[in-house]
Image (cartoon, rainbow, N blue to C red):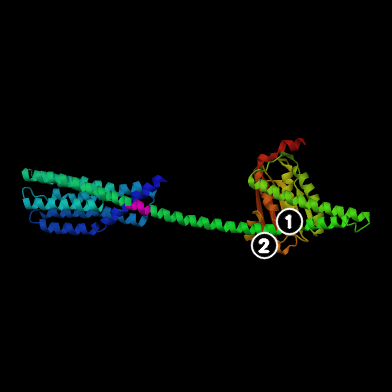
């Protein structure tokens, strides 16, 4: 992260320097043409044309690099590549301009020589400020133009020219110090701008996350409210039965002993229903807290499914629902928590029977891909809308078609099944189409399969 930030900062510094150099692409050839007109009295036309052509050619690479840099919006990881390209292009341009010392210098002509020294001094001062934000380009300025400015007077020598060279050295060091201040100011300014941009992005992201968290909290609050409403109904019904029948027994409203046995049986059934509800809530709490402990053994999944189907057969019959068992032959044993597996099958069957009035429910088990086991329940009932398919596995979540069913339930069956499947390292898949039915498949990994044990049994 720090390297990426540093790379972005160096690219921003380079972008500032290249933007400042933008006018040079057409201004420098214009300046060169004016200089050639001025120097035709001292220098031959051939040498002037050669220098002008060299300078014009040296501007092209810098212009191309600047244009591609602005259009390409380079990534921070490409910072070093772009800095090398820009530095090389700028070096060619600087060498082309500084070559006036070679092509335009007329020995022992004071006016000619002083104009060249003046041009080079202005070039060092101007370019040192223009590219000061980028250290590699600033180094090129003082290395190329500075060397030319010092070397030019030394060509003729003498007290005056040697003094001008000495002044040039002092002048270059002063400009280098000023360029360093420009570099530091530009760096601090760009760092502040980047920090501000990062802060804005972080604030926007935090707001987005806050909105998502708020929406989830509101959804959870709504789901809990619906759960409490459903639970109050689920708890009130058996409690009313227990209180009503026990009051009748206590008041001795009936002298028939058989009636007392009947009411006692109803009270017992209501108590069992209450215990089931409480166990569901406790199981879900353990699963969500990660405290659910598996008591694993080698389980005959086919026998377990037969037992679960037998338990649910009366409910299916009362709902006019046909219940079919389709378990593959020679199914291997499964190393799992038998009670948890049975709970999964019962929860899936209960949901399927509830939402398949007068239809067909099929519970199946077979070998799965990769040596695993697949079991589950399929029905041709009301189906689940696409927008509800993820929600029904959430705690207290229920599909919207539940409002058309008299027995709404608590919305805990599928979340408990999902938690128990995950506790076994498995996955659960839902396929459903509204009005066509639903298929819920549980996939247990190959590590749960006990082939040899099944063969031995």
Q: Which secondary structure lies at badge 1?
A: helix
Q: Which residue is mark 1?
A: 352
Task: Farthest residue to the right: give it.
Answer: 256
Quadrant in the rendering for residue 73: bottom left
Image quadrant occupied by the C terminus: top right
In primary-sequence order, the first of circles 1 and 2 is 1
Q: Residue at x 28, y 49 (%)?
A: 183
Between residue 342 and residue 73, name the one nearer to us: 342
The magenta segment: 189-194
Residue appearing at x 46%, y 57% in the figure: 204
> Disc 1 to disc 2, how far (Cα)?
15 Å
- Label 1, residues with CA under 10 Å away: few <14, some 14-19, many ≥20: many
Q: Is residue 307 above or below residue 389?
A: above
Q: Are marks 1 and 2 in contact (CB under 8 Å)?
A: no
Q: What x and y, as percent, mark residue 261?
A: 89, 53
| Residue that numbered label 2 is attached to | 400
């Amino acid at each position: 992260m720090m390297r990426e930030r540093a790379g972005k900062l160096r690219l921003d510094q380079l972008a500032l320097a290249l933007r400042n150099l933008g006018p040079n692409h057409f201004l420098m050839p214009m300046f060169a043409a004016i200089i050639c007109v001025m120097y035709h009295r001292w220098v031959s036309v051939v040498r002037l044309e050669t220098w002008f052509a060299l300078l014009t050619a040296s501007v092209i690479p810098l212009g191309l690099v600047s244009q591609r840099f602005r259009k390409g919006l380079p990534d921070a990881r490409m910072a070093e590549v772009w800095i090398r390209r820009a530095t090389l292009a700028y070096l060619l341009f600087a060498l082309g301009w500084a070559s006036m010392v070679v092509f335009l210098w007329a020995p022992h002509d004071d006016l000619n020589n002083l104009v060249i020294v003046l041009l080079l001094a202005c070039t060092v001062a101007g370019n040192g400020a223009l590219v000061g934000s980028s250290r590699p380009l600033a180094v090129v300025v003082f290395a190329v133009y500075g060397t030319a400015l010092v070397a030019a007077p030394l060509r003729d020598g003498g007290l005056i020219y040697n003094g001008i060279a000495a002044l040039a050295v002092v002048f270059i060091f002063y400009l280098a110090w000023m360029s360093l201040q420009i570099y530091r100011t530009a760096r601090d300014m760009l760092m502040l701008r980047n920090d501000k941009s990062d802060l804005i992005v972080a604030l926007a992201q935090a707001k987005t996350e806050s909105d998502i968290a708020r929406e989830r909290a509101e959804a959870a609050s709504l789901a809990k409210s619906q759960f409490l409403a459903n639970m109050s109904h689920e708890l009130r019904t058996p409690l009313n039965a227990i209180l009503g029948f026990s009051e009748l027994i206590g008041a001795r409203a009936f002298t028939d002993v058989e009636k007392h046995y009947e009411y006692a049986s109803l009270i017992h059934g209501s108590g069992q229903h209450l215990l089931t509800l409480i166990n569901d809530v406790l199981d879900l709490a353990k699963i969500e807290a990660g405290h659910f402990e598996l008591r694993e053994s080698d389980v005959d999944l086919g026998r377990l499914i037969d037992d679960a189907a037998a338990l649910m057969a009366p409910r299916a019959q009362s709902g006019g629902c046909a219940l079919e068992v389709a378990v593959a032959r020679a199914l291997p044993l499964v190393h799992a928590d038998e009670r948890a597996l049975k709970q999964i099958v019962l929860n899936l069957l209960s949901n399927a029977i509830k939402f398949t009035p007068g239809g067909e429910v099929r519970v199946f088990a077979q070998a799965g891909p990769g040596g695993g086991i697949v079991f589950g329940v399929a029905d041709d009932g009301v189906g689940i809308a696409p927008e509800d398919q993820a929600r029904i596995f959430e705690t207290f979540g229920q599909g919207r078609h539940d409002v058309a069913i008299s027995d709404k339930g608590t919305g805990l069956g599928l979340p408990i099944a999902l938690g128990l499947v995950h506790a076994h390292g498995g996955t659960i898949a839902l396929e459903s189409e509204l009005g066509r039915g639903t298929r819920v498949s549980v996939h247990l990994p190959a590590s749960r399969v006990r082939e040899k044990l099944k063969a031995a049994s």
